């Protein structure tokens, strides 16, 4: 996965071009956004990650 950082060099998200996935982790919650081949978007939220 490729890291995306803001101007303060803080990690904003990670992207994976091959799987068309964006992963955002904020305050122990992970949001995974996946762009499907049929044009739809799949969003999965997971809380209390290690």
Image (cartoon, rainbow, N blue to C red):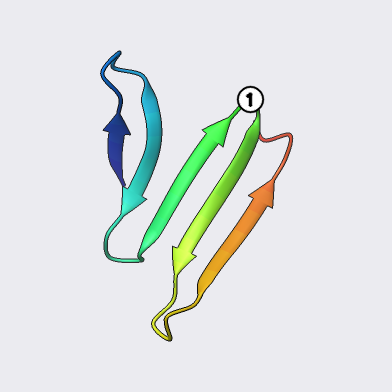
Residue at the image point whose x is 63% and y is 25% from the top: 27
> Going 37% across and 26% down the picture, which residue do you hit?
11
Count of numbered tags: 1
Quadrant the C terminus occupies: top right
Quarter of the view holding residue 2? top left
Residue furthest bottom in the image: 38
Query: Which residue bears the numbered disc 1?
Result: 27
User: Residue at horizontal 60%, vertical 41%?
Assistant: 30
Horizontal and vertical percent position of residue 49: 67, 35
Q: Is residue 46 above or below residue 33?
A: above
Which sits in the foreground, 37 or 2?
Answer: 37
Q: Residue lying farthest top?
A: 8
Q: Give the left or right position of residue 34, taking residue 37 as reference.
A: right
- The residue most toward the right is 48
Where disc 1 sits, the SS reads loop
On screen, residue 35 versus residue 41, left or right, reads left
Q: Residue 15, percent across and down?
A: 34, 49
Q: Measuring from the top left, give residue 19's x and y in whole percent.
A: 35, 66
Q: Residues within 10 Å of mark 1 (few under 14, many from 20)?
A: few
Q: Quadrant of residue 16?
A: bottom left
Question: 25 above or below 36?
Answer: above
Q: Residue at x 46, y 46 (%)?
A: 23
């Amino acid at each position: 996965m490729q890291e995306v950082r803001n101007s303060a060099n803080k990690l904003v998200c990670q992207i994976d071009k091959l799987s068309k996935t964006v992963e955002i982790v904020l305050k122990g919650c992970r949001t995974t956004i996946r762009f499907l081949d049929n044009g739809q978007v799949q969003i999965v939220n997971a809380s209390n990650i290690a």
